[in-house]
Image: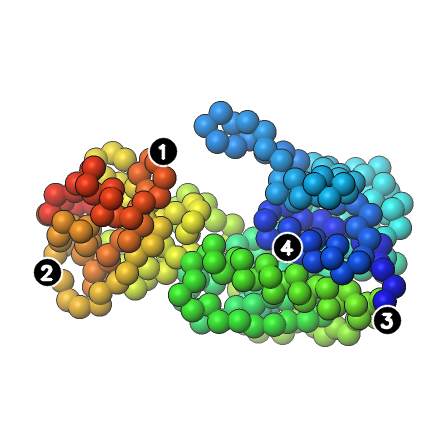
Amino acid sequence: MKPLRIIFMGTPHFACRALDEIIKAGHEPICIYTQPPRPSGRGQKLVESPVKKFALNHHLIVETPTSFREARVIQHFLAKAADVVIVAAYGLILPQEIVRNRNAPCINIHASLLPRWRGAAPIQRAIMEGDKTTGITLMRMETGLDTGPIIAKEELMIGADDAGALHDRLATLGANMIVDSLQHLAEGPLPEHPQATNGITYAHRLNSSDEPLDWMKPAAQLSLQIRALSPKPGASFIRAGEKWKILAADIDDSCTDGAPGEVLDNCLTISCGQGKLHPRIVQRPGKKPLPTSEVLRGTPIPIGTILS
């Protein structure tokens, strides 16, 4: 197999697995593009992306442009003369000069079964909506949002995974799929077909409004929300002015006499619009996630408390 000269573009941990497998397969990553360092934590210290850390550990060349609006940035990219560009959760918009460059097709590793869940948060939205399956789509990029023709698609069951566990399984699947496709590309053009025009949904970026738990909703729906937001940013409720997070919970669909949000016992069983929620892992502000029983030993919540 002829090793391919690859420009790899990615930012979070999801992309690291694909880059690792590409290197192991014997291809040549000639440059890694990732987002610039971002402020993080209480001190707002600048933190490099997981992909940059991985790339530097492997002695790879790294570029961190803030955008591709300037012609000099685009020309610098094109001058590298790659065989193919691989994009995995990069996070910056690419100009048409790059995505339409037939000398180096742009292949995106997207964590959903397109056209369902185009956009920034496909893993979380799939869980939140109660989807039974999801998967990875490899597509040739266009200027539209995840609209390009499909090169390959593989499905997996979501099961009881939270977003963290599903992320890891999808990252592994995507890495294996891109290596297979690169092997085919080294031998000739990749087959592709247009996306379906029906079943299109959008996975809008998560924001703070996704986090609060609405106790009027059924426990089963709140469980999906908790799984979708675990381990980060976490589904939340307010207790005595503090923002607590629930990172894992069980549900009981049986009837409850409690008001929505009412604490029913000393184990923090919470009455919902339908059924009850049993938090297993909770997190107080500034603390580590812990089993609910451990947190309640130090900070009990009285029976009858109404959580907001």
Residue hosting label 1 = 286
Q: Nearer the viewer, residue 267 or 232?
A: 267
Asked which secondary structure carries label 2, the reply is loop
Disc with the residue nearer the chain's start (2 vs 4):
4
Q: Nearer the viewer, mark 3 or mark 4?
A: 4
Give the residue displayed 33% in from the left and 59% down from the top.
223
Which of the numbered marks, if any, corresponds to residue 188?
Answer: 3
Amino acid marked by disc 1: Gly
Please report contact status of discs 3 and 4: CB closer than 8 Å, yes or no.
no
Q: Nearer the viewer, mark 1 or mark 4?
A: 4
- The answer to whether any part of residue 26 appears in the image is yes
Q: Position of residue 165 (x, y in %)?
A: 47, 58
Please report contact status of discs 2 and 1: CB closer than 8 Å, yes or no.
no
Q: Nearer the viewer, mark 2 or mark 4?
A: 4
Residue hosting label 4 = 17
- The quadrant in which residue 307 appears is top left
- The span from disc 2 to disc 3 (Cα, nearest Å) is 66 Å
Asked which secondary structure carries label 1, the reply is loop
